[in-house]
Image (cartoon, grey):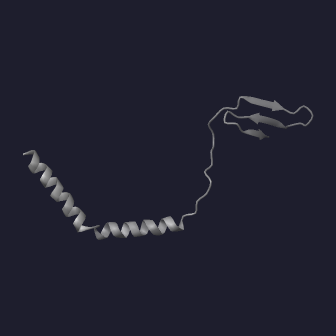
Amino acid sequence: MRRTRILTATLALAAGLLAGTPPALAADSARAAIAADTYTWKNARIDGGGFVPGIVFNRTEKNLAYARTDIGGAYRW
């Protein structure tokens, strides 16, 4: 009985491979290829999250502060 199931599954797989890609899927993959060619890649924005463990206010210049972040960044505000 187990051999029959394995044989049936193998024959179904072989029939699917021999049939090729259905026309509807071929059109979808052609559209996806065109869309991939026309896409413009950009840098990802990172908003929010993380910690600011250190803030230093400038004593000589009003409204100037420096912030240190947990990921190694430093910001001047």
Quarter of the image with the N terminus is top left
Q: Quadrant of residue 77?
A: top right
Q: Quadrant of residue 74?
A: top right
Q: How many marks?
A: 0
Please state if 53 lies on the left or on the right of 9 as rendered. right
Name the residue at 70% across, 32% down.
52
Name the residue at 22% across, 62% down.
16
Please state if 58 lies on the left or on the right of 35 as rendered. right
Please state if 51 lies on the left or on the right of 2 as rendered. right
Furthest residue toward top: 53
Name the residue at 71% across, 28% down.
53
In the image, residue 21 above or below residue 67: below
Q: In the image shown, does 50 or 18 lie closer to the viewer?
A: 18
Q: In the image shown, does 30 or 60 lie closer to the viewer?
A: 30
Percent across and percent down for residue 67 are 76, 35
Percent across and percent down for residue 31 are 42, 68
Percent across and percent down for residue 70 are 67, 33
Percent across and percent down for residue 48 are 63, 39
Furthest residue toward left: 1
In the image, residue 30 above or below residue 48: below
Name the residue at 47% across, 69% down.
34
